Image (cartoon, grey):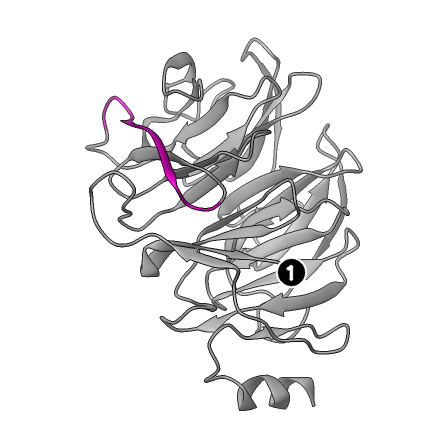
Amino acid sequence: MQQRHRHSWHWLPGLLLLLAGCGDRTQPERVWGRQGVQDGDFARPRAIAIDRQDRLFVVDFTARTQVFDRDGTYLGPTWATPDYRDGRPSGLSIDRDGNLLLCDSHYHCLRIYSADGKELRKIGGDAGTGPGQFSYISDAVQDEDGYFYLGEFGENQRVTKLDPDGKFVKSWGSGGLEPGQFFRIRALALGPDGNLYVCDACNHRIDVYTRDGVLLRHWGVEGGEPGQLRYPYDIAFGKQGQLYVVEYGNHRVQKFNTEGQSLGYWGTPGRGPGQLHHPWALAVDSKGRVHVVDTQNHRVQRIAF
């Protein structure tokens, strides 16, 4: 019944179906951005992070990182990684000191920037499978104790843990479809329970680990029904501990509790407000609003969900 209801309203822009509730529908609060290469424009934006001041950092396919306020006003500055001929960055997060963690994915390293674009530190840069070496780094997060967690795919399908100095501690995972294996990690998030949540995109699931690499649980199978996932590309926690998942393949954002129960989803495929076209990323601001990187529409949409 719920699935039939979803398709019957498919043409409505700004569709919101709260499948666990009364079925409210709403428009996005804001839609901003346009295709281009000038300051404030986007060319396939691919990652987003938000700091304690609600400044949004967005990196796009030109390898530029730009800074905006939560209403989409360009604040500046704009900067790029030192070299992007081999490929562009694909992961952003904020460290415990308020600096930006930028995954320079194709250059096998993590770069740490101040909010004004000054590179403070570089970790890694040596391609390989050994301790301290990396393949494609898709995302990175830092816990309150200063430890870094890096998601990799390509030659390495694993999570690597580093100490605050950037030295290798341990890694876990291998390529595959079974629990404890990965098939293209796209994003990481530290939960309010202190555990590490892993967005395992091509396994269409979310994996939950302790910070020492013990698998606690996982959920998700490929599909478009509530609770199912299709190429989850990013995850972020809300103020009440809910987990938001952006689905590249389903063109939507889905909300879960930490046990994997679906609490609803937002978005349909398309170009209009409230519609998404292969979204890659999302971030949650201090008011609990979700900022969705609508990649192939070259924009950001803000929703209260």
Q: How many marks?
A: 1
Residue 83 at x, y = what percent? 23, 25
Asked whether, in this view, residue 89 is left or right of residue 93, the answer is: left
Residue at 71% over, 58% down: 256
Is residue 113 within the magenta segment? Answer: no
Q: Residue furthest top?
A: 165
What span is in magenta?
Answer: 71-83
The answer to whether residue 181 is visible is no
Residue marked by disc 1: 305
| Residue 120 higher or lower than 38, as above or below | above
| Residue 151 higher or lower than 264, as above or below | above
Q: Secondary structure at mark 1?
A: loop
Residue 40 at x, y = what percent? 30, 42
Residue at 49% over, 17% down: 132
Residue 11 at x, y = what percent? 45, 85
**Amino acid tagged 1:** Phe
